[in-house]
Amino acid sequence: MAPARMVVGSLWWVTLLLAMQVASSAATAQDAVTARQLGSPRVMQGPMLGAAGPHGMTVWARLNGPFAFRVRYGTDRELRHARWSTEVRATVEGDWTVRSSLSGLTPQTRYYYRVQVAGRSDKYLKGRVFSFLTPPADDAPAEFEIAFGSCARYGEDRVQPIWAAVERARPSLFCWLGDNIYGDSTDPAILAEEYRRQRDVPGLQPILHSTPQLAVWDDHDFGVNDYDRRHPRKRESLEVFSRYWANPGCGTEVVPGVFFHHRFGGVDLFFLDIRYHRDPNAMPDGPGKTMLGAGQRAWLEAELLRSKAPFKVLFSGSGWSAAKGQGGDSWASYMHERDALFEFIRTKGIRGVVLASGDTHVAELNCIPWSERGGYDLYDFVSSPLAQRCTDSWLDRKPEIRIRPVWFGSESFGVMRFDLRPADPTLEYRALGPRGEVVIRPLKLRASELTNGTRSWDRKIDPIEARRRKLRTVR
């Protein structure tokens, strides 16, 4: 019986392989016919790296038709000892966007890759080989940097010199915190067109090819200025967003939105959707007013309780501080929900939470002194803009505590450097300008400073801001 089983098993495998070859040949023939009709199969936007893990990477691209797409990848630049990703096919329903998953990777290893469209190298990419570095394993403490920013308006700046500075900084991950495009439309076709324009910025290409990208939205890529849950076509906006990013998740099975959790190098990152379920800014604040929606907030609380990471970053398109005041387009108009979240963090003894946001067209570093309520101080790293005009509106705003002077002299991006190797891991935040210059002086936090009963802001505040704060108190 054993030999018979072996023969049957062998025949099954042979049949499967033959079927795969026939299917592949048919697909290749189909691509050849389509190519004669549409022209050379090629990548229109991308390739762009998306969700990244120590053992896997996602590659996104947009093609010029219904062609097959796959990636050849390996640890040698010549790709002699390489493997292929599973083939995926672009569809008109997906606006010709594709995602290819690279698996079987080794942590903290340099990989090289080349994309193939319709069974051959892209004619216009000329066989270019790109590379990326996989993140550290969760159980192997390491040092790495995560960069982030917001507000990239192609119509305002088509060159966007900030990307040269990001490339020189060489972060392990780049996070987009909203207004990643200025669609300013309820028409999903316009949003998609604006994504394509932004993806074509020449200086952005090296970052897309070599650095994983994750994103959430804010008002201008959700719809129009200050938009909220009343958006009449928000489901379609969500579909466009999902096509043009390669995040590891997008809401839950029962709660729609762009929110997701991602672990990177032993740090937990929580990307929040602050538009899809958002009540109007002008609505009176109170227990019934929400920015996140009940479903997303329950998801966030459950994920925070599960997290054992020394640092937990909460990314929000809207600023966390009280700076804009009631009625403003920020958490300042949702203080009841914000404070309830912070109290949840305190009462559950959740350590290591820091905040990051964008939107304001200036770079800031503010603090919400939750140590006054028995918790620990919550720092908001604000990074904006990437490619948009800076403003002076910050002059009229009053966050709880300014830790550093505001930077409004140029575009900028934020950088968080994590070092998980010490017994007391550290996080250092700074902001950099278009020449790579430091525009927000570094702030260093130890994990032990982000525990209940710990006050730290008075040791971290810039002397200039300390004097300003004292003068305001005297007045």
Image (cartoon, rainbow, N blue to C red):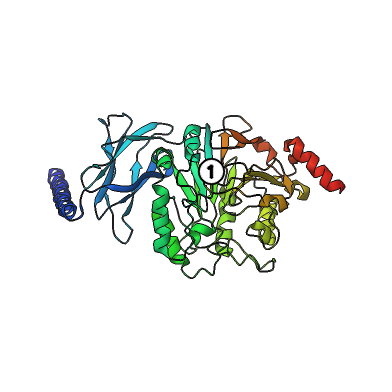
Q: Is residue 171 in view?
A: no
Per the image, label 1 sits on a secondary structure element best described as: strand
Residue at figure coordinates x 68%, y 66% from the top left: 287
How far across and how far down the image is residue 226, in percent? 57, 62
How far across and how far down the image is residue 183, in percent? 47, 58
Residue at figure coordinates x 75%, y 46% from the top left: 371
Question: Which of the 4 image quarters holds residue 443?
Answer: top right
Return the residue nearer the eye: 361 or 55.
Answer: 361
Q: Would residue 458 be found to the left or right of residue 71 on screen?
A: right
Return the residue nearer the eye: 185 or 346.
Answer: 185
Q: Would residue 138 be found to the left or right of residue 332 on screen?
A: left
Residue carrying label 1: 148
Q: Would residue 254 be found to the left or right of residue 205 on screen?
A: right
Residue at figure coordinates x 76%, y 50% from the top left: 373
| Vertical relation: 65 (above or below) 415 | below
Q: Residues within 10 Å of mark 1 (few under 14, many from 20)?
A: many
Instruction: Kindly identify the amino acid type of the residue bearing the numbered disc 1.
Output: Phe
How far across and how far down the image is residue 277, in percent? 55, 64
